[in-house]
Amino acid sequence: MPSTEIGRSGGFPDGFLWGCATSSYQIEGAAGVDGRGPSIWDAFCREPGRVSRGQNGDVACDSYRRWPEDVRLLSELGVGAYRFSVAWPRVQPDGRGGPNRAGLDYYSRLADALLERGIEPWVTLYHWDLPLALGEAGGWTARDTAYRFADYASIVYGALGDRVGHWTTLNEPWCSAFLGYEHGEHAPGLRDRNAALRAAHHLLLAHGLAVEAFRSGGHAGEIGLVINPATPRPATRRPADLEAARRASVERTGLWLDPVFGRGYPAPYLAARGAAMPALDGDMATIAAPVDFVGVNYYNEDAVAAAPASPASPDGYRLAPTSTEKTEMGWDVVPQGLRRVLGFIAGSWPVGALYVTENGAAYADTEESAGRVRDADRVAYYRGHLAACRDAISDGVPLRGYFAWSLLDNFEWAHGYDRRFGLVSVDPRTLERRPKDSYYFYRDAVAGYLE
Ligand code: FCB
C-alpha cells in the first residue's frame, strides 16, 4: 500500500539532527538572581553609547523563570536538540572558586525537562558572558583566564555530564577576540590589534584545556568548537581581489582550525600583522586536543576587494558593496555561501563531523494579522539555507545537523532588542511568546516536509 510517509526525510539523511539555539545572556535575564555575578556584558551595556538605546540583558526574555514555556515551544517544534549556553557567572560568580549550586541547578532542571521531552541538551560553555572579575583582571588577554575556564568547564561537566551528550567549548571565538578587543563592538570594547591576537591565543588555549579536562574526566559524549567561518567572495577576478578574499578568510577559518587540527598558526597571517602569538611550550599540543566535531555558525557571505593598507583597512582589504538582498542586519542573503563554506572546511581540515550550529535572519517588519505573526522573509531565508545544507550533503560534506538561530527574539548584543532573530516573537513589554510563521515552517522541515 502506498505510504503517506514517502519523502518524510525532506531529502535529509536519516538521523540528521534538527535543533534550535539560544545563549544565556541573550535570553535569561534574572541578572542578579540566585547569586549570579556580573559579566563583562552587564558592565559593557552600562557604558554610554555601547548598546543601541542603552539596552541591556537584565530582563531579556526572562527565560530564567519562563523556561518551562520555552521547553514547551521546543517540544511542539519537534526538534531533537536544544543548544543553550551556561552563564559562567551563574556557576562561579567571580570566575573562580567553588560552584554556586543555585546557578547550576537552573541548568540541571532545564536539562531534565528537555530530556523528558526527548530533546537532547547541547551545552555551550562560553557564549561571551565572561565573569566581570576576570574581565577586570585582563579578560582574554590574560593567560590565567584560560585556566579559570578549564576549572569552570570541569565543574559544569561534573554537574551535567550524566545528561549532556554534546558540548561545545567556545562560541565564535573570533567575535570574542576581534569584536571584543580590536573592533570595540563587543565587550570589553577595546581597540587594540595586539590585544585581539593575545585574546585569540588564550581563547584557543582555554578551548584545548577544556577538551583535555573533558577527556581526562572520563565523561561520555562528544565535544567540539563552534566558529563563525567566512569565505568571502572576491569582488572581481583580478588577482589582487582573489588574494584579498583568500586573506580575508584566514582570520575566520585557519586562525582557529589550523591550530585545533595540529597545524600551528597560519604563518603568513601573523607575518602580515607583524605580531606573534604569546604561545608557551606545550600550548599548541593542548590546543590540538582532538575534537569530535566542528560547529559552523553561518549568516552571510561578504564580497571583498583589495585595498591599500590604511587605518580603515589595516589588513589590506575592504568589504565591497553588493546588489544582494539584505537582512535587517545589513547582511547579504547568500544561501549558497553556506554550501561553499561547509565545503571549504570539509575539504581543508580533517573534520569528522560538521554541524550548522547557528543560522537565521533578522527582519524588521513582521505583519501580524488575525493573531498570526507573518515573517515571509525569514521563511524564505530558512528555505534557501536548508536547501544549501542538502546541497552540501550531496557534495559529500559530513553535515550531521542544523540548529536554527534563534528560538526567541532576544538581546542581539550591541543592537539590543532592535534586531529580532526569533522563530517565536517575544513582546518586549509583556514577554509574551508567539510563534511566527517561520516557527511552523521549521516545524514542518523538522518533520520531514520541506518542500
Ligand atoms: C552570532 C552569535 C549569536 C547571535 C547571532 C545573530 O554571531 O553567536 O549570539 O547574536 O550571531
Image (cartoon, helix red, strand yellow):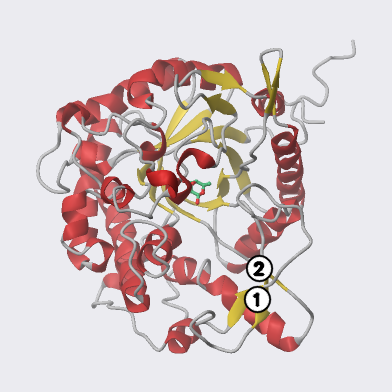
From the top left corner, tell me how far across and down residue 72 is, in percent: 49, 15
From the top left corner, tell me how far across and down residue 396 is, in percent: 71, 54
- Residue in the foreground of this view, choosing between 424 and 200: 424
From the top left corner, tell me how far across and down residue 278 is, in percent: 27, 78
Q: Mark 1 points at which residue?
A: 245
The outermost residue toward the top is 1
* Mark 2 vs 1: CB contact within 8 A: yes
Q: Name the residue under label 2.
A: 232
From the top left corner, tell me how far across and down residue 155 is, in percent: 20, 40
Q: Quadrant of residue 80?
A: top right
Where 152 sits versus 233, above or below? above
Look at the image and tell me whether residue 364 can be seen. Answer: yes
Chain-order first, disc 2 or disc 1: 2
Q: Residues within 10 Å of mark 1 (few under 14, many from 20)?
A: many
**Three-letter code for the amino acid on which mark 1 is drawn:** Ala
Q: How far apart are marks 2 and 1 (CA)?
A: 6 Å
Residue positioned 54% across, 80% down in the render: 313
Instruction: Establish whether ligand 1 lies closer than 8 Å to the Cβ of label 2.
Output: no
Residue positioned 60% across, 52% down in the render: 298
